[in-house]
Amino acid sequence: MVSDATVDRFYYIFDSRAHRALVLDRATGKEVAWRSVPRVQLIEHIEAERSPAVLRAFARWCARQVGIEAMSENAPAARLWSAAQQDDPAAWKAAREETTDAVVRAAALGLSRGRSAAARLLVVHACTHPEARQAAIDATHMTERWVEFDEGRPAEPAVRAVRQRHIDWLLDALNRGREE
C-alpha cells in the first residue's frame, strides 16, 4: 500500500463545477473519502464546537506556512491571498474566477510534476473556498504537498511533521474556545 503522506497516493483534477482541485485516490480512482481521515474528523469537530471562522483562520495559517506572504503581488497566489484575508465571499469568488487558469494548470500539471509553487497556489486557493470546512481540508492537504515538494525525497517524515503541526494548531484552537 502506498503511503498517504506522498503525492504517489493521489492524482488531481480540477472540477470546474466545484471550482476546486479534487484529490483522487490512485488505488480506487475515487475522490478521497475525507470523512474517514482523522485530521478531517478533528476539523469537523472544531467546526461544531467553535465556528467556521476558526477553520478559516486555520486555512490562512496553512497559507502562511508555505510562504505566501513573500510572493510578488502580481502572482496569482498573491491575488488570491489578498482576497483570502478579507471576510468577503464576493472578493473570494472574484479572485477565484480571475485565477482559474493558473489554478487549473497547478492542479493538472504542477502537482504531478512535484512543483512546490503549484501546491502553494492551491493552498491559498483553498483559503477562498466559500465553505470554511472545505477550505481547511484543502489547505491542509495542499500544505502537505508543498512540504513534500519543497523538502524533496524522502519527504514522508517532513509531511508527518507538518501533520502534527496542523493537529497542534487545531487542538490549541479547540482549547482556546473552552478557556473563553
Image (spheres, helix red, strand yellow):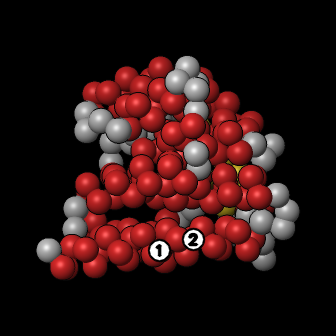
User: Element type at marker 2?
Assistant: helix
Q: Quadrant of residue 155?
A: bottom right
- Which dot marks residue 163? 2
The residue under the point 25% across, 38% down is 87
> What crowding class fits label 1: few (fewer than 14 Cα within 10 Å), some (14-19), or many (20 or more)?
some
Depicted 159 relative to depicted 10: above or below: below
Name the spot of residue 86 as percent of width and height, x first: 30, 35
Labels 1 & 2 near each other (Cβ < 8 A): yes
Depicted 29 relative to depicted 158: above or below: above
Name the spot of residue 91 as percent of width and height, x first: 32, 27
The residue under the point 77% across, 58% down is 151
Name the spot of residue 38 as percent of width and height, x first: 48, 77
> What crowding class fits label 2: few (fewer than 14 Cα within 10 Å), some (14-19), or many (20 or more)?
some
The reply, left or right, for residue 80 in relation to residue 149 is left
> Hey, what amino acid is under mark 1?
Ile
| Count of residue discs | 2
Name the spot of residue 158 as percent of width and height, x first: 70, 68
56 or 108: which is nearer to us? 56
User: Element type at marker 1?
Assistant: helix
Residue 36 appears in view: no
Q: Which residue is mark 1?
A: 167
Q: Identify the residue at the far front of this view.
A: 70
Depicted 57 relative to depicted 89: above or below: below
